[in-house]
């Protein structure tokens, strides 16, 4: 367990007491035996394991949707485990060492999303095209990031979208519409055209593109925030799950981190499974899953639509 930090009174970052650490440690699955793992054993579980030691034992073609947020090609410390940057070819070899095995866990009509930044996106495209049909690349804007005196500030990340069968996959665009303010409302015969008047202002429901500028990266005052160094926002993952996994379907995340994919899947009525090698991260995930039983809200997603960043409705 990491050493506790002094935090401001309004800081909502999720932490663990020693009692919680012990309690949630007993809720994770370890699968210490070397035999194959049955499908019913992994549903709604957090698996504490090194991915390489367990991926070949998982049931084939069990997941409707796989969301992968692997270590980027950067030197980064993950609670004592340091992933080191390498050449692009070396990083591509790293991806190839596990990606085909993960694809084998996807149903024939399933979808897969693979996250990365500008530095590793070329390698991600290569490994996706070797194993799946690539349908798109989503780019989302991070409003956080370090400035740079001799380069452009890195404020974007990519998510590659691929499927096994380009003629047979689930995609429900109606669930991921965005509610945007109408700045120049147009009327036809005196009535709003493709927009609505509300007490909060004028809004239009729009179909999403592959550029997302409405995402807030978790920070200290958000109830989903943890100390994980690369935590993805719940709102970001919610878009992927709603669009590409039917209700009751199974979402799998082989690099679970602090549990965002599993937590959002639970909040949205999907089944989940995630693998994480760090026990404390597993415990954060289990605590967040417990919290989701009494609060299934997702900041920025309300009334079945996604709201613009920093708009009036945030939860």
Image: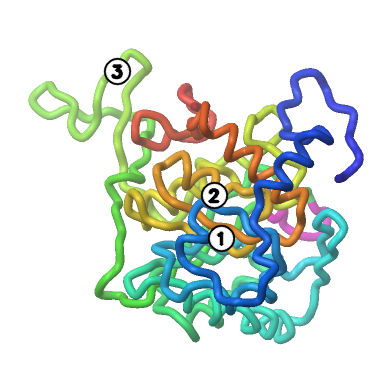
Q: Give yes or no for contact between labels 1 and 2 (Cβ–Cβ under 8 Å).
A: yes
Q: Is residue 123 visible?
A: no
Residue for badge 2: 262
Residue for badge 1: 253
Q: Residues within 10 Å of mark 1 (few under 14, many from 20)?
A: many
Residue at image position (47%, 78%) is: 104
| Quadrant position of the N terminus in the picture | top right
Q: Earlier in the sequence, mark 1 or mark 2?
A: 1
Q: Residues within 10 Å of mark 3 (few under 14, many from 20)?
A: few
Q: Assign a secondary structure to mark 3.
A: strand
Residue at image position (17%, 27%) is: 187
**Camera-side mark, 1 or 3:** 1
Measure the alpha-carbon separation of dots 1 and 3: 39 Å
Q: Is residue 153 magenta?
A: yes
Residue at image position (81%, 68%) is: 83
Magenta extent: 148-154
Return the x and y of residue 39 as percentages of the image width and height.
46, 65
Residue at image position (35%, 29%) is: 303
Residue for badge 3: 198
Q: Earlier in the sequence, mark 2 or mark 3?
A: 3
Q: What is the residue that sits farthest to the left in this orientation?
A: 189
Measure the alpha-carbon separation of dots 1 and 2: 8 Å
Q: Assign a secondary structure to mark 2.
A: helix
């Amino acid at each position: 367990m990491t050493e506790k930090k002094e935090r401001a009174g309004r800081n909502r970052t999720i932490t663990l007491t020693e009692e919680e650490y012990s309690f949630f440690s007993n809720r994770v699955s370890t699968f210490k035996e070397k035999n194959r793992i049955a499908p019913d054993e992994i549903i709604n579980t957090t698996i504490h394991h090194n991915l390489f030691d367990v991926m070949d034992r998982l049931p084939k073609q069990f997941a409707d949707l796989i969301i992968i947020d692997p270590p980027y090609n950067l030197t980064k410390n993950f609670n004592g485990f340091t992933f080191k940057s390498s050449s692009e070819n070396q990083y591509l070899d790293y991806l190839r060492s596990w990606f085909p095995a993960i694809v084998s866990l996807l149903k024939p009509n399933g979808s897969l999303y693979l996250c990365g930044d500008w530095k590793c996106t070329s390698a991600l495209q290569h490994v996706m095209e070797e194993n799946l049909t690539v349908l798109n690349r989503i780019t989302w804007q991070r409003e956080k990031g370090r400035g740079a005196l001799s380069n452009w500030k890195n404020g974007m990340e990519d998510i590659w979208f691929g499927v096994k069968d380009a003629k047979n996959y689930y995609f429900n665009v109606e669930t991921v519409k965005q509610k945007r303010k109408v700045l120049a409302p147009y009327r036809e015969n005196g009535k709003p055209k493709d927009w609505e008047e509300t007490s909060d202002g004028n809004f239009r429901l729009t179909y999403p593109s592959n550029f997302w500028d409405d995402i807030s990266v978790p920070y200290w005052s958000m109830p989903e925030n943890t100390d994980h160094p690369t935590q993805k926002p719940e709102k970001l993952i919610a878009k992927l799950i709603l669009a590409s996994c039917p209700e009751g379907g199974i979402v799998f995340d082989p690099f679970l981190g602090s549990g965002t994919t599993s937590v959002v899947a639970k909040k949205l009525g999907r089944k989940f499974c995630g693998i994480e090698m760090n026990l404390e991260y597993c415990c954060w995930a289990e605590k967040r899953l417990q919290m989701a039983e009494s609060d299934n809200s997702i900041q920025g997603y309300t009334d079945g639509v996604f709201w613009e960043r920093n708009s009036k409705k945030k939860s």
